[in-house]
Amino acid sequence: NAGVTQTPKFQVLKTGQSMTLQCAQDMNHNSMYWYRQDPGMGLRLIYYSASEGTTDKGEVPNGYNVSRLNKREFSLRLESAAPSQTSVYFCASSERRGNQPQHFGDGTRLSIL
Amino acid sequence: AQSVTQLDSHVSVSEGTPVLLRCNYSSSYSPSLFWYVQHPNKGLQLLLKYTSAATLVKGINGFEAEFKKSETSFHLTKPSAHMSDAAEYFCVVSDNQAGTALIFGKGTTLSVSS
């Protein structure tokens, strides 16, 4: 009964290092999302994938890239980490885009020094 | 453009008393609305959703919300708070027409004292 699984749960990076956050869902959902959560800001969408083979930018895509590896997996990459990317990152999935509820992982807490 | 405003950043109640978390929305089209809860160091969990059926929506753990189009509100209520309700709550809107991803409010932290 895993749902959405994110790895790693915690990570500390130095400025300029690269990192890939992994996300996998076992609910056969078509759509997947990456958000960042910062204090007092709610969740902001970084990238999403409406279906396998497609990806699109969200509200705050700068400094990030994504890959929809297959229907189950959606990864987020920081090519050159910056302190402003210190945040909690959440992956989510839904049956499709639009008015569907999303199912969230437990998050990756990322600190950039 | 659609948006959502949570009117209180922090609400404190005593155990056994009613809970009211306020949310106003703005949408160009008929919206779908959600409430999510986030416990410390956890992901978000869906409490309830409104998708143009009944205006009074019942969710998990005794929570409910009423969609009021005339007031553009979707307030979350619970008759009697429990200690385990202490968490952060997010009001969320999705635009059916454009099919965009969810737009989150900034959250309301609910504290429950004994």
Image (cartoon, coloured by chain):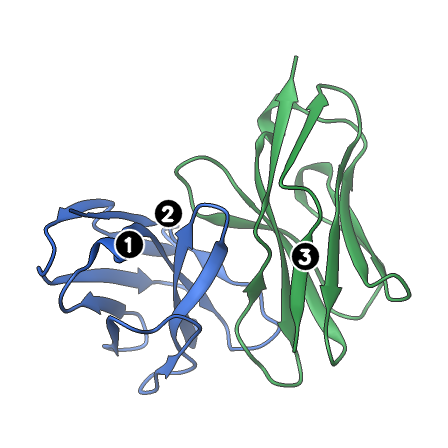
Chain colours: A blue, B green
Find disc 3 in the rendering and name its residue: B5
**In front: label 3 or label 1:** 3
Query: In the rendered view, does A34 fall on the left or right side of B50?
Result: left
Residue placed furthest toward the right = B70
Find disc 1 in the rendering and name its residue: A6
Q: Amino acid at mark 3?
A: Thr
Find disc 2 in the rendering and name its residue: A106
Query: In the rendered view, does A93 fall on the left or right side of B96?
Result: left
Give the camera-side residue of A79 and B18: A79
Label 2 vs 1, first from the N-terminus: 1
Q: Residue at x 19, y 59 (%)?
A: A82
Looking at the picture, do discs 3 and 2 lie on one chain?
Answer: no
Image quarter where the N terminus of chain B lies is bottom right
Marking on residue B107: none
Chain holding disc 3: B
Label 1 neighbour load within 10 Å: few <14, some 14-19, many 20+? many
Estimate the spatial distance between the alpha carbons at disc 3 and disc 1, rounded to whole Å: 29 Å
Contact between labelled residues 1 and 2, with CB atoms less than 8 Å apart? yes
Tell me residue A71's x, y (percent): 32, 76
Q: Secondary structure at mark 2?
A: loop
